[in-house]
Amino acid sequence: MESILFKAVFQDFEKIHLASLKVLENTGMRFFSEEMLKGLEKNGASIDWSGKIAKIPAMYSEDCISSQKNAIKKGKKQILLNGGVSSKTGNKISCKFGSGAFYIYDWKNRRKFCPDEKDVAETIQFGNVLDDIGMIGIPVIPEFINGKKPSPHVLPILRAMLVAKNTGKVGNSEVNTPKQLRYLMEMGQVIKGSMKSFLEDPCFLTAKHPISPLQLDSNACEVLLALAKNGLPSNIVSMPILGTSVPVNLTGSIILTNAEIIGTLCAIKSICPEALVLGGVMPAVTDMRNGEISYDNPLAVKVDMAMAAMYDNFYEFDFGLGIYCSDAKFLGAEIILQRNIQLAATVLSGRMNPPIGLYDKGMVFSPELVLLEMDMLKNHAEMFGNRNLFEPGKNSEEITEILDAIDNVKPGGNFLTQDHTIKNFRKNFHSALLTEVVSLKEEKKAKGLFELASEKYELIKNDITPFMLSSDKEKEIDKIVKKACEDILNG
């Protein structure tokens, strides 16, 4: 689906594009990678070696953009699987579990808690049985595994292991070193059956983030280059904070954020010209009253939508939309209001796979919120997702059925027993989760949205047929994890 929002407001994307290239040419971007700096220097960049800043010629930026655009037009597959951003999936709803939270909220007992590996596995299994969940990263980060706090150096490997053992759906696992990436790829090879199959259709991917403004740290440089050298897409997701790390208006924030993405694309292509480099954005706005950041601020949502529109219509690349959670700290009406607006924005931007289930700035995961957000997304998809109000080619057949039903009912009748009603009711009926239950006897609310969602969650949980990885693949995964832990912790 083509993103249409902001076309009228931002018709001249080229001005934004040229301004971003001026930033890269005049101000430059800092790369904490000697290899990247040397690659850029070979391609005409002016390098300040003491400051590690590359001033990238606009002509080279244009060449890198053109080469990627041509590769995509020739059929190069765009893969953007970062768990925190929404990419293009056509009209299919395919929500995500991703961007790991630190807590799970237990609605029944009204408490949040730090999960262990069993809780994480149950959460992944829950996502595995939901048809409208297409990707499962780690929705929550386990505080304990086998009763111990895992080392952060091996946690990405352990998280990927939990995904591999509890779902057949693709997942993301944020890795921090090329060595971690190597073991992630080995696990992917086991799941897919061969490295060739994994590279063609990865079941694990990772993205890295620049440090705004205009810096790519050594960790991000190393991992992005390792991805490119191994034939995997190098996804760069900028996280601008308007008013702190980027200008606090729409045009300024887009110019600088776009410069970070294009600069990273140039640095990677200076070494790996055939690499696929895709971008995304997860903006927030500084709240000057308390110094905190807000993802719900309308300006942050506008940055998301404008960036997505620019990449859809000007660069013609897929782009990650970062509308992923509510700022609200407690489950209630505030979250429903905030997420309703955000989910409408994702659909209007042509993206049907938002991350769901997260609130309190992504710190807490709620299964009940997952179910409510899926229903909200379906409502928005029904309203805004399909521009064809009538199904092509079916109008004549449908109108004939309708006329027959009307003739059968006649004046003063009803349609409850008509075949047309029975045939179409389920297709056009939407979940009752978003409608409160009112006691007519007591004339008060009996159940609210989260109570209804909790009941549905319990039914789903009790009816789950657990995903089971084949025993031979599970043994191979365990061997890889053991080897990785020994290598990373003792190497």
Image (cartoon, rainbow, N blue to C red):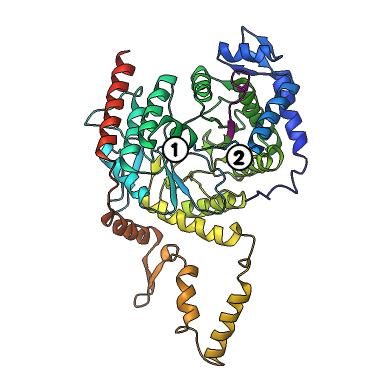
User: At 35% across and 52% down in the image, what residue appears?
Assistant: 129
Query: Is the magenta region chiefly helix, strand or loop?
Result: loop
- Where residue 370 appears, as percent x and y from the top left, is 41, 51
Furthest toward the left, the residue is 147
Circle 1 — which element?
Answer: loop
Instruction: Pick the residue in front: 436 or 466.
Output: 466
Q: Quadrant of residue 254?
A: top right
Q: Quadrant of residue 454?
A: bottom left
Name the kind of residue labelled 2 in the image. Answer: Asp
In the rendered image, residue 11 lying in the magenta stretch gets the answer: no
Instruction: Give the residue type at disc 1.
Output: Ser
Mark closest to the chain's N terminus, 1 or 2: 1
Task: Say if 157 sits above or below 339 in the image.
Answer: above
Within 10 Å of disc 2 (Cα), the crowding (few <14, some 14-19, many 20+) is many
Say which element carries label 2. loop
| Residue 99 tag number | 1
Q: Are marks 1 and 2 in contact (CB under 8 Å)?
A: no
What residue range appears in magenta? 269-279
The picture places residue 94, in percent across and down from the top left corner, at 48, 50
Q: Is residue 386 left or right of residue 140?
A: right
Query: Which part of the image, by quadrant, shows the C terminus?
Result: top left
**In the shown orientation, is residue 152 left or right of residue 410?**
left
Place of residue 185 in the rendered image (x, y in percent of width and height, measured from the top left): 41, 28
Q: Is residue 413 left or right of residue 441?
A: right
Q: Residue furthest top?
A: 50
Q: Does the magenta segment cover residue 274?
A: yes
Question: Which residue position is annotated with label 2?
Answer: 318
Q: Is residue 144 visible to us here? A: yes
Disc 1 packing (10 Å; few <14; some 14–19; many ≥20): many
Residue that appears at 67% across and 10% down: 47
x then y, percent, for residue 250 = 68, 38
